[in-house]
Amino acid sequence: MGYRRLNDKLRHDQNIVVNDKRILRLCRKRQIKSNLKYRYDGCTRPSKNPAFIAENILNRKFDAELPNEKWVTDVTEFKYGTTFDAIHKLYLSVILDLCDRRPVAYVLSDYNNNDLVFRTFDIAVDENPDAHPIFHSDRGYQYTSRVFHQKLEAAGMIQSMSRVAHCTDNGPMEGFWGILKREMYYKKKFHTKEELVQAITDYMDYYSNNRPQRGLGVLTPMEYHKKQLLAA
């Protein structure tokens, strides 16, 4: 983790409050470095024949006062295997709450298809039956399908989509992928699907319950979520 993350952990876990620069100086002295984020210049390609396209209702307004007010979602890809000829792919679909940055629901699958996205959405609705958020995604074919739009309408949600080739319209989701892969995936080799699934599952639990965030007042997503529910 970086020096800011290390300082946040000290504040959250041990109630030690020091300046970021002191942590940075000590990290440099001991040659402690965090993983660097890989440069990524691509965006999800839009569906060639979208059945439904929504306006960018979210409009980069990524703040939310209450849980289940704004949800963002996306799918990302992981690879595992032992040789170049035996590389396999695993896909992770996540719905993220913009209030407390908690993963509302997530699903892993061997295939990046409608079923992956639909299952993620169904889990989120089942666990949050009273939620009627703005639901934001890119223009991937799963999200532009008529069936998915009908599922959103049935759940009483407002659909919002990023503009074409504007990844920053879904900035918090892209940021989450960067955090997850930098802390759990980059510079590591996963030989089997079971190893990768376990690593992702463990990290999702760690992120929700043990990873404090400065933007949440040095609380974990679930700690902040419970705090907001008590205040509502």
Image (cartoon, helix red, strand yellow):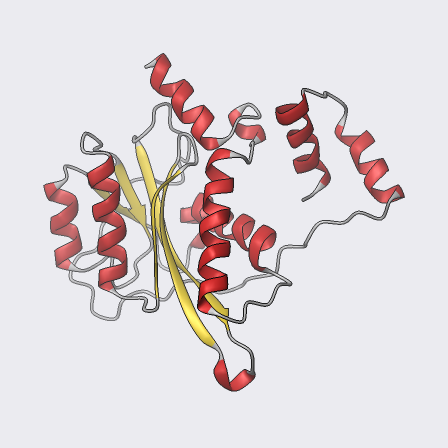
Q: Is residue 72 left or right of residue 24?
A: left
Decide which of 5, 138 is in the foreground and name it. Answer: 5
Quadrant in the picture for residue 124: top left
Q: Quadrant of the N terminus?
A: top right
Position of residue 39 relative to residue 34, above or below, is below
x, y percent for residue 211? 55, 36
x, y percent for residue 181? 55, 55
The residue lying at 56 percent from left, 31 percent from top is 212
The residue lying at 11 percent from left, 50 percent from top is 150
- Most extreme residue toward the bottom, as rendered? 85
Q: Is residue 98 left or right of residue 35?
A: left
x, y percent for residue 80? 50, 71
Decide which of 39, 130 is in the foreground and name it. Answer: 130
The residue lying at 80 percent from left, 37 percent from top is 24
Q: Is residue 77 left or right of residue 126?
A: right
x, y percent for residue 58? 33, 39
